[in-house]
Structure formats: structure tokens, C-alpha cells
Image: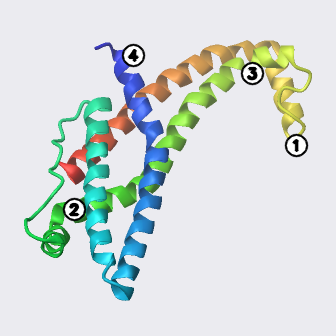
Amino acid sequence: MTTIARTQRRIAYLLLGFPLGTAWFALFVTAVSVSLSMVVVALIGIPMLWATWLAVRACANVERFAANTLLDRDVPLAPMTTGTGNVWARLRAMSGDRRRWAELRYLFLRFPAGIATFTAALTALTVPVMVAVAPIQARIDDHPFGDWALSGRMEDVAASPWAWLLVPLGAVLLVAAVYLLNRLADACGRWTVRALG
């Protein structure tokens, strides 16, 4: 596999952090709160909690698969069920399983971590391109930077003859950004292995 393909997969993992983290957070905040409230009100909460624990394991396995595929990690998938017997016995076994609690904690923390990785990846990729394109855009458009307080100064800088130095600066920033995003993806992979391995 080429370095470019590997980098693209790592950046895809960082960008996936936001939608996956948001989905896990919304799903499990809702599932846990509804299930626990239904245990108090009616016994229907017991199978709901059991289904929640199954969903935790399934979503953690999705995260394991994503880390294995996109970050070249080797995190084994976990079995879906724990324990034997009726729903109550299985629920007790799942609730006592420390790995499931670690998976739930990971899935909740994936939300703020996903926001951070998504923001870092998006910023690191767009800022160098914007810097490199600024001199070209300043010569094509009448008001390339809009109509805000510093837009006039930015337009003067981007339209100056020295502005062409921004093109190689943008290329250097892009190379640095790709390097830093690879390091960030490595850190995310280590965290996933520690939390779910």
C-alpha cells in the first residue's frame, strides 16, 4: 500500500470521528436514560437495557473495524453476548462485564474526541489550500475576502507582488499538516487499542 493511500485512510478516520461520535453519543444517552427510566416504571426496561448492552458491543465492534481498516491496527472484534440463561441473567452478566463498561466509556468519549479530530483535520487541510489560492483569488474576484473589518487589508496583501510567495507557503503548510494529521491518527489508534483491545 502506498503512503498516499495510507494517509488518505488515516485522514478519513479523523473525519469520521465527528459523525460516528455524534451518533454514538445520541444513541446511548437516549438508550440508557429511557431504559433506566423504564426499569423503574415497568419491567420493559430490562430487555431494553439488555438491547442497549448489545448495541454498545456492536458499536464498539464498528470502532474496532474502523481502526483495523483505516489505521492498520489489530483490535480483535468482541463476541456479542455474555453469559447464558434468561434475559435477566444475561443482563446481569453484561452489566458486570468490565469490557462493556470500557466500551461504553469509549463510545461516550468518542463524541468530544471526534469533534476535535474532525476540526483538526478540516482546518489542517483547508487553511493551506486557502493560503495558496489567496493570490489567485485576489486577482480574479473584486472582493475575494468579503466585506468585514480586515478584508481590505487581506485583499491588499493577497494582491501585492509578494503574495505569490503564499503559494509555496501553502504547499509547505499542507505537507506539515499531513504529517501532523498522521501523528494524530497514530494517537487515536493507540487510544482505540488501549480502550477496546
**Callout 4: SS:** helix
Most foreground residue, 62 or 120: 62
Residue pointed to by mark 1: 149
Could you say which disc has been placed on residue 134 in the image? 3
| Residue 76: % across, % down | 15, 42
**Callout 3: SS:** helix
Mark with earlier residue (1, 4) = 4
The reply to whether callout 4 and callout 2 are in contact (CB within 8 Å) is no
Mark with earlier residue (4, 3) = 4
Up-down relation of residue 24 to residue 48 (above or below): above
Q: CA distance from mark 4 to mark 3?
A: 26 Å
62 relative to 95 in the view: left or right: right
* Residue at position x 26%, y 43% in the image: 64
49 relative to 115 in the view: left or right: left
Mark with earlier residue (4, 2) = 4
Residue pointed to by mark 4: 4
* Residue at position x 40%, y 63% in the image: 28
Q: CA distance from mark 1 to mark 4?
A: 39 Å
Residue 180, visible in the rendered structure: no
Say few, some or many: other residues with alpha carbon within 10 Å of mark 2 (under 14 / 14 to 19 / 20 or more): many
Residue pointed to by mark 2: 100
Q: CA distance from mark 4 to mark 2?
A: 35 Å
Viewer-nearest of discs 4 and 2: 2
Q: CA distance from mark 1 to mark 3?
A: 18 Å
